[in-house]
Image (cartoon, grey):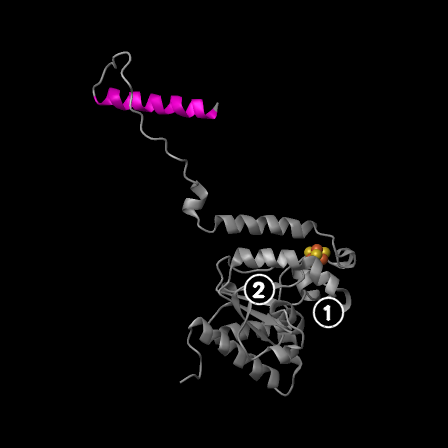
Amino acid sequence: MAETLDLARQLALHLDSLRAAGVLFVPRGQALALPPPVAPAPVEEATDPLAARRHALEVLRGEVAACDKCSELFSTRLQPVFGTGPLDAEVMFVGAAPGPDEDARGEPFVGKGGQLLGRMFAACGFTREQVHLLTVIKCKPPKNRAPTNTECANCRDFFRRQFEAVKPKFVVALGTVASRLLAGKKGTVADLRGAVLSYRDVPLVCTHHPDDIEQDASGTLKREAWDDLKLMLGALGRPVPGAK
Ligand code: SF4
């Protein structure tokens, strides 16, 4: 039916163009050469190359909002914390789980550690608004405990789909939980940091969580994190402060 209507519309347009060109009648039986059918352009795709990825993220956001796979987290969270940042962010920073501040605001990394993270971004030449921030699980565990393996497994598909929608050029895992999950290796962040690894074929650096850096009075974790971020800058081809 739709095809018949299309053909009728094309025929009408063609007759209009003949009329405009001064042709007042067409002899019976003369074949009308219709222009070849034009496939409808995917208007949204043509004007917004990120449309499909944006749509995928919005679908995902809805699924996360309704998710109750981890019954304890579902019953104690104020809201899931989906993540922030532009869809075409160059770098993605990944923590373990939202804490109480993040649960209250619905945004990742908004506590004291988040402020330190903001200063670390600035030292790298990024603003918070230029990077993608998220956590491997979306709901706050009670009493600020680490997420369990089951909770991480429950949320793994959400994380993977979000990662694929953003497709960053580089990913930074913050702290032991995120580092283990993304690197796919055992060990602590101290074992995994200091090298460029990979997650789903995207270069990955593991480093200390800003909350741990905040609590380290010796300054060692801060220096090590800075070394890790310089690895990232070098791998991205960005200027590395202090490099000769
Ligand atoms: S942590 Fe993830 S899987 Fe668990 S309830 Fe929250 S959104 Fe669902």
Q: Earlier in the sequence, mark 2 or mark 1?
A: 2
Residue drawn at x 27%, y 16% is 30
In front of the other: 186 or 166: 186
Hey, what amino acid is under mark 2? Answer: Leu
Task: Please identify the residue farthest to the left as the structure is shown.
Answer: 22
User: Which residue has dot 1 on it?
Assistant: 146
Q: Position of residue 208 (x, y in %)?
A: 61, 77
Q: Which residues are magenta?
A: 2-21
Whether residue 67 appears in this view of the structure is yes
In the picture provided, is 34 more to the left or to the right than 199? left
Hey, what amino acid is under mark 1? Answer: Ala
In front of the other: 86 or 17: 17
* Dot 2 alpha-carbon crowd within 10 angstroms: few under 14, some 14 to 19, many 20 or more: many
- The question of residue 9 being in magenta is answered with yes
Circle nearer the viewer, 2 or 1:
1
Helix, strand or loop at mark 1: loop
Q: Is residue 30 above or below residue 243?
A: above
Q: Position of residue 119 (x, y in %)?
A: 54, 75
For the C terminus, which image quadrant?
bottom left
Q: Position of residue 185 (x, y in %)?
A: 64, 72
Q: Is residue 10 above or below residue 235?
A: above
Residue drawn at x 65%, y 83% is 216
Task: Please identify the residue farthest to the top as the structure is shown.
Answer: 28
Q: CA distance from mark 2 to mark 1?
A: 18 Å
